[in-house]
Amino acid sequence: MKLAIMGGTFNPVHIGHLVCAEEAVSQYGLDRVLFMPTGLPPHKEIQNGAGPEDRYRMCVLAIGGNPRFEVSRYEIDKQQVSYTVNTVRHFRRQMPEAELYFITGADAVLEILEWKDPQDLLMMATLIAATRPGYPLDKISGSLSRFLTENRVKIMEIPGIGVSSTMIRRRVSERMSIRYLVPEGIRQYINKEGLYRQE
Ligand code: NAP
């Protein structure tokens, strides 16, 4: 069983995240992708954001219909700072036989040496750093060359999707359409709950 935990704020989840997860399934032969909305990030406050329950519900709406995708409440329910190493340790204990991956954005991966216990994390899971087209790959290969050589970090380019959560929030606050940039259920949820109306 190859299980990937897909970590992020998901504020909100958008088609780029879904394409990323699907691409990881294709490229690495994953059996399951577990979307893991961050509860309390260790390194920042979630500003201009939807609350954890909204971010969780949007992930559930977004993955509907894909049998390989699931959403976890683990970090949201913990009510403690969400250190990735602790999350991965939990799933390692739950599923000792599984081959674990952790997928997140390349910008976050660049900071990995400042995360809690990065060596332990990389012993337990392979990190997949997702990049958008045009992302300067030398940025990653420079600072993480050792882990790339050891195959503990992999760089995965997401095909042709230039959407970001920041872009979605800005467009909502400027009353611009987000149709087709997020799944339809997410667009309706954002509208109904009045999320992101103020920058
Ligand atoms: P973030 O603000 O949500 O994302 C940072 C960048 O990566 C953004 O450009 C984001 O794009 C992109 N991104 C995020 N998740 C992605 C995904 N799954 N696939 C593709 N792109 C993605 O996240 P963050 O706060 O930097 O943290 C990312 C993950 O790393 C979280 O799971 C967090 O808990 C973990 N982390 C752990 C530690 C630690 O253990 N000490 C420290 C930092 C981060 P969008 O804005 O479009 O999503």
Image (cartoon, rainbow, N blue to C red):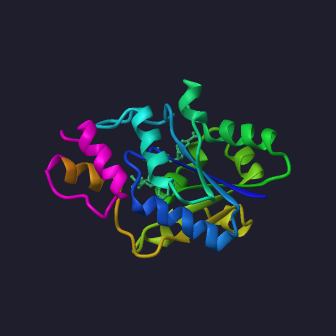
Residue located at (53% from left, 58% from top): 65
- Nearest the eye: 184 or 98: 184
Q: Is residue 45 above or below residue 27?
A: above
Confirm whether residue 195 shows in the render: no
Residue at the (63%, 59%) spot, across then down: 68
Residue 78's x, y, as percent? 59, 26
Residue 150, position in %: x, y? 74, 65
Q: Nearer the viewer, residue 62 or 126?
A: 62
User: Residue 188 placed where, x, y %?
Assistant: 29, 48
Q: How many marks?
A: 0
Please, which residue is most extreme toward the right here? 97
Q: Quadrant of the C terminus?
A: top left
Viewport quadrant of the N terminus: bottom right
Q: Nearer the viewer, residue 88 or 120?
A: 88
Q: Is residue 190 magenta?
A: yes
Quarter of the image where one finds residue 69? bottom right
Residue 95 location, x and y as percent? 80, 45
Residue 189 visible in the shown view: yes
User: Is residue 5 found left or right of 64 in the rendered image?
Assistant: right
Give the residue drawn at x 42%, y 45%: 58
Q: Is residue 38 positioned above or below 135 on the image?
A: above
Q: Residue furthest front?
A: 65
Q: Which residues are magenta?
A: 173-198
